[in-house]
Amino acid sequence: MDEERAHGALSCAGRGREREAIVSYPKLDELVRTVARLRGPGGCAWDAEQTHESLVQYLVEESYELIDALEAGTRDDIIEELGDVLYQVLFHADLAANTPGEDFDIEVVAERMTAKMVGRHPHVFGDAVARTADDVVAVWDDLKAVEKPGRTSVLDGIPQGMPALALADKVIGRAQKIGVLDKDAVAAIPMQTEDELGGLLLAIVASAKSQGLDAERALRSTLRDLQGEIRDAELPAGGQ
């Protein structure tokens, strides 16, 4: 996890273990069975025809709808959209459970995720100490280096299909991590609030549109150049 996400790490930096309890979720089990029924013999013909690839558009759509609900929706909106995203996860898992060569189900997904979270939080489940968000990020960085020994660049693992602004945030964080971008040098545009930032971004996009320019494509192009600079900076001295 990147330093720019350190704020989220606060949620686990000092959490105790008082919430550890055995809880059953019968409605979740019922939903798993519902997915299996819809995709099984005598179920829904449309569901039965779907593939991982054909479902991608729905996963993207449901994810954006969840974001809308989290940012501006009601409690019921959030419940509904979380359910839609959960359904996508269960659908893919059931599909895999019935696809030769894949052969995993939601239990395997949950098992892997539990092991990952326990392994990534030795300060909660083990004896490691991480009292602040920065401490947690340092622990995560060390663990990821061990988990992903094949990664040779700070850029490895960044999904290039992210929206350009989200991708820029990721790439800039990695660039600053190795000194390609100086934090002070890129803070030349004065702004103090997200409202000011939003107005500035909107003005840039509006100006680009009025001149027939594609802001998304332009930012992606610049990010490709920046990623090239990062990879060049990571080369050993004299390397090609």
Image: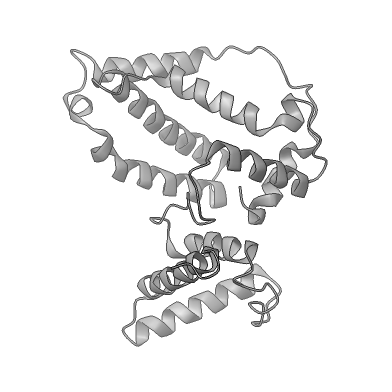
Q: Which residue is drawn at 78% across and 23% down?
A: 17
Q: How many marks?
A: 0
Q: Is residue 188 above or below residue 56?
A: below
How far across and down, in percent of the image, does residue 208 sit? 39, 82
Which quarter of the figure has residue 196? Answer: bottom right
Q: Residue furthest bottom?
A: 211
Q: In this view, does 172 lie above or below 26?
A: below
Who is closer to the viewer here, 49 or 4? 4
Quadrant containing the C terminus in the rendered view: bottom left
In the image, taking residue 4 as reference, residue 34 lies left or right, namely left
How far across and down, in percent of the image, does residue 79 sit? 51, 34
How far across and down, in percent of the image, does residue 86 sit? 44, 31
In the image, taking residue 39 as reference, residue 195 lies left or right, namely right
How far across and down, in percent of the image, does residue 46 sit? 19, 29
The scheme the figure's colours follow is one colour
Q: Residue at x 63, y 71 (%)?
A: 195
Who is closer to the viewer here, 120 or 58? 120
Q: Which residue is drawn at 70% across and 46% down?
A: 137
In the image, taking residue 92 as reference, residue 129 lies left or right, namely right
Who is closer to the viewer here, 3 or 95? 3
Q: Is residue 62 above or below residue 212?
A: above
